[in-house]
Image (tube, rainbow, N blue to C red):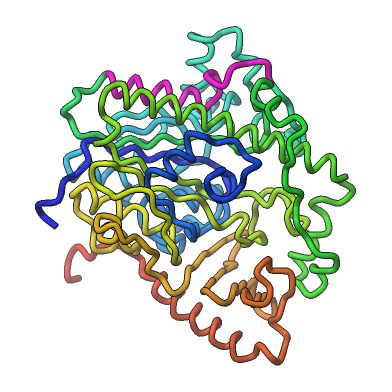
Amino acid sequence: MPDAPRPKQVLWITTDHQRHDCIGANGNPAILTPHLDRLVKGGVSFDDCWVQNPVSMPSRASFMTGLYPTQTGVTWNGHELPHHHKTCAHLFGAGGYHTAQIGKLHFQCHLDHDLWLQPRHPYGFEYFVPSEEPGCYEDAYGTWLRSEHPRYREVMRVGRAGNPNRDAWVCTAVDAPSEVSHAGFCAEQTMRYLRMKPAEAPKFIHMGIYAPHPPLNPPKSVLDRYAGAEIPAPHAQAGEDAAMPPSMQRAMRRACAGRSPSELRNWRAHFYAMCTALDEQVGRVLAFLEERSELDDTLIVFQSDHGDMAGDHGLMSKGHVTLYPEVMRVPLVFHWPRGIPGGKRAAGLVEAVDILPTMLELAGAPVPAECSGRSLAQGLRAGNPAGTREDVLAQSGGEPGRLTCMLRTAGHHYLNYGPGQEVLFDLREDPRMYANRAADPACRGALAEMRERMLNRMLAAADPAVKRVHAY
């Protein structure tokens, strides 16, 4: 559509660990997210978007290049994105946009990164303000706190990643406003960047919020809003681990062992409060854009890199065994009043690799031929948005030398952990996924079909996505 309008600015907001049901407008009245609710209700919200990996580095490398983990070479945390891949920054830059990275990107390892001498690689971003963790390091966020909010520098510091004392079960409420959180830093830096650049200059900003990733340290004033609230308890079924592969059995029996319902409720209350605090900061940016009369001309895309089990199925956090909807299904919202008819919910399966080509097409920027994602732009522009996939694929390299794979269709959810370690859920009979039917003779046909589908999808995702330079 060569005559279609393109947004003057593109703002891609990503969070970390935020489940699909951690937005109130996505059907959870217990969580308070009025600003994200506004984006959902005024934009297009996809109800069935699935990420391609359950942990941050490979998931982000995948959806920010439009490639599968086996194509990027990043299948687990600790694998850094090779520099030859074209990222969203390169591609929006080629489309005439000035590009900015603010907050969490996580293409490179960050453990103790303030002790490393090599600079962060900018991966094509022209304006680069990275901060991968909230307060652990002397990075952009830590420096901002020290220089502009010194009384909160130590209050907002969390344990360093990798520290054995950094317990994901430990929840604290900090006596500090959400404006000084990592999300507040991202909001402030985004607004500063927009003030700095000329209004007429097309801009692409990735705003990477760390929350609600544990350790959970919401502002006390926000946590207080959940005092006495009815928070949904985790769901599980007694004995559901019995027919699972050994690695899943171990994880399901260990994660929440000995934890009381009150402990789980407390953890979830802190998790919800983290979502509410980041929502407040998204609201600050929306108000800023409105004040400048720029909201209608800004394409805002909101999503998370993965979710969190949060006690469901007896599991916590994420990992190579947790390829359940609680981790793999994420919120996805497109909001652009001048270019996309809003107020719609989109059904149908979508992969996170589809997000980048959709954004590029909406922005009038070229979509590279090697991109594995499928653009959803035509349906968005026409006011008839829907997912276009018959199945969604995920790949996880949780153990060295072996991939764990997930394939989901409308009727089945299939996991393969290696020879003899298969899981098959019949979603029509068992939508909450409690009973492994892989060994059930009645499901033999469905199992064979899912195996074949996965083989075909994995072969397609094995394309290295590297351009041929010469004939030989």
Which residue is found at the position 68% from the left and 73% from the top?
430
As for residue 186 lying within the magenta part, the answer is yes
Q: Is residue 213 above or below residue 393?
A: above
Q: Quadrant of the C terminus?
A: bottom left
In this view of the protein, which residue sits in the foreground, 400 or 170? 170
Q: Is residue 78 above or below residue 120?
A: below
In this view of the protein, can residue 351 be seen by the observer? yes
> In what quadrant of the picture does the N terminus appear?
bottom left
Residue 325: image quadrant is: bottom right
Q: Is 163 left, or right, of 12 in this rendering?
A: right
Residue 155 against residue 199 in the figure, above or below? above
Give the prevailing secondary structure in the magenta stretch: helix
**Residue 284: percent from the left, percent from the top?**
43, 24
The percent position of residue 32, horizontal first and vertical second, equals 59, 35
Magenta residues, as a range? 174-195
461 and 394: which one is in front? 394
Total count of labels: 0
Residue at 48% over, 68% down: 392
Quarter location, residue 175 = top right
